[in-house]
Structure formats: C-alpha cells, structure tokens
Image: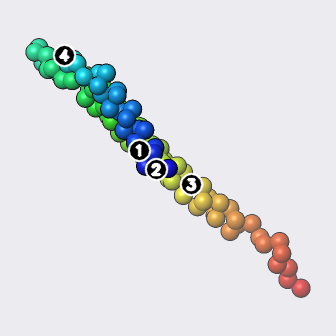
Amino acid sequence: MKVIFTIILTSIVVLFALQNFEYASLYFFAPKPVRIRLFFVIIFSGVIGWMLRYITGIAREEEFKRRFKMLLAEYKRIKAMVPDEDYEEF
C-alpha cells in the first residue's frame, strides 16, 4: 500500500513540476530580479511554511508542558493539604 501511495504522490509532484516549469522573476531585496523556475519557488515556499508551522507548534508544545508542570505541582500541593478521608484514628 505504501508503494502505491508513493508512486501516486510522486506522479502528482512530477506532473505539477512539468506544469510549472517556466521561470519567474523574483526580487530578493535587490533592484535586479533573480530568475528561478516557478516549481522551485512553490516548493521552497511550501517548505518554509511547513517549517514555520512546525516551529510554532514546538513553542506551543513547550508552553503546554510548562502549564502542565505548574498545574501538577499545584495539584500536589493542594492534595497534601487535604486530609485523607479513608484514614481515621480510633
């Protein structure tokens, strides 16, 4: 199943590349344009977008871990203050 999926995905990428094979003029903070094939511009922008999303996801994950540790410490502190109801002295 993975082989078939890989073949289909590769075919789609190749067809996309063939359709977008002309050059595009880009200005990278310079007065003279840089000519790059459109396919590479699209792929590069997709990779950059994925990386930004990944980095922000890591930052959000670290924030969740920090909150969880803080809430767990507060829970343990509150639980230590509450007497155990199952234990009774006779």
Q: Work out how far the residue at label 3 is from the one at label 2, CA to CA, in angstroms.
A: 37 Å
* Residue hosting label 1: 6
Q: Residue furthest left?
A: 32
Name the residue nearer the viewer: 57 or 66. Answer: 57
Q: Residue at x 83, y 71 (%)?
A: 85
Q: Amino acid at mark 1?
A: Thr
N-term-proximal mark, 3 vs 4:
4
Q: Amino acid at mark 3?
A: Phe
Q: Is residue 47 left or right of residue 85?
A: left
How would you rate the neighbour count of disc 4 (Cα within 10 Å): few for under 14, some for 14-19, many for 20 or more? few
Q: Quadrant of residue 59?
A: top left
Q: Residue furthest right?
A: 90
Q: Does the rendering let one see residue 52?
A: no
Q: Residue at x 56, y 54 (%)?
A: 68
Name the residue nearer the viewer: 90 or 3. Answer: 3
* Residue hosting label 4: 25
Image: 25 above or below 79: above
Contact? badges 1 and 4 (CB < 8 Å): no
* Residue hosting label 2: 2
How would you rate the neighbour count of disc 1 (Cα within 10 Å): few for under 14, some for 14-19, many for 20 or more? few
